[in-house]
Image (cartoon, helix red, strand yellow):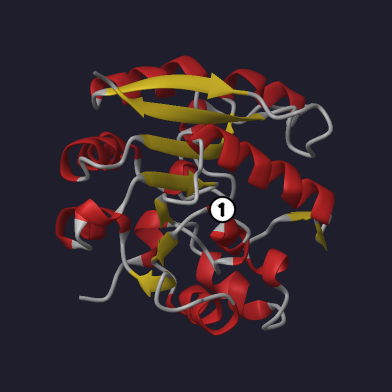
Amino acid sequence: MKPDLSRIYPANYDAHARSVAADAYWQQVRRTINGTPVSETQIGIIVEAIASGLSLSPHDRVLDLACGNGALSSYLFDKCAGLLGIDISPYLIEVAQRAFSRLPDYRFEVAEVMSFLRHGYRPIAFTKALIYAGFQYFPREETLDVLRSLKEGFPTVTKVFIGNVPDRTRADRVFANVIPQANELDDHEARIGIWYDPEDIVALANAAGWWAKCCRMPADFYLSSHRFDVVLDRAG
């Protein structure tokens, strides 16, 4: 069955990616400032946060959920033994396969996250997992299942990095005049997705069996004022 894009991502997610140049990798996934791609310095800050948060080693195999076009994933290739990126967008995976795959160890596939976690790749293959700028677009009713499936179905995954989550406690730093209503901040189909209170996402991770710690990006990161990251460790 063909995945329902509107359930997982904003309605214009796939369409937007197709609307820009085939090699405009950061524009395709909206990693931009006022429409201009972020600098390599900013990408370096993200990569360092991921590598540090996951304690990446040359022996790790990474499962990258909601990987987009693989541009960010590719910066991790030299830091791990293998990576599989999955995304629901056929177009973005086509870009990832064309521009960034390094077969057989660094590859990309079209898949819906929950379907993959339940029926996908051999779980023994992965030691770390990543969800960067994608968790807020999962329907809230699926988030516990996502984290629980990673914990129970992938026993060799020791750490999960959830990155670039909109901070509900800091929404006023973005919306200076009128802060959106609660239902708007809870809409996974909105352009920014669901805004989470850090304490709530820690509680969610704990309920799924993970020990969780929220982290802040350096002040010179372009979204540091209203985004946070979460590192999950296998409890016990």
State the image coordinates of residue 169 (x, y, percent, origin top left).
60, 18
Residue 141, picture quadrant = top left
Foreground pick, 225 / 189:
225
Report the number of discs: 1
Q: Residue at x 63, y 59 (%)?
A: 75
| Residue that mark 1 sits on | 79
Q: Residue furthest front?
A: 58
Identity, as a three-letter code, of the amino acid under mark 1: Lys
SS state under label 1 = helix
Residue 188 visible at all = no
Q: Residue at x 23, y 36 (%)?
A: 151
Q: Residue at x 49, y 37 (%)?
A: 54
Q: Residue at x 15, y 60 (%)?
A: 119
Task: Give left or right: position of 117 versus 9.
Answer: left
- In the rendered image, the quadrant that contains the N terminus is bottom left
State the image coordinates of residue 133 (x, y, percent, origin top left).
55, 47
State the image coordinates of residue 225 (x, y, percent, origin top left).
75, 27
Residue 175, picture quadrant = top right
Foreground pick, 78 / 169:
78
Task: Give left or right: position of 138 versus 166.
Answer: left
Q: Please, is residue 67 above or below residue 173 in the view?
A: below
Residue 180, picture quadrant = top right
State the image coordinates of residue 83 (x, y, percent, origin top left).
43, 61
Residue 41 visible at all = yes
Q: Residues within 10 Å of mark 1 (few under 14, many from 20)?
A: some
- In the rendered image, the quadrant that contains the C terminus is top left
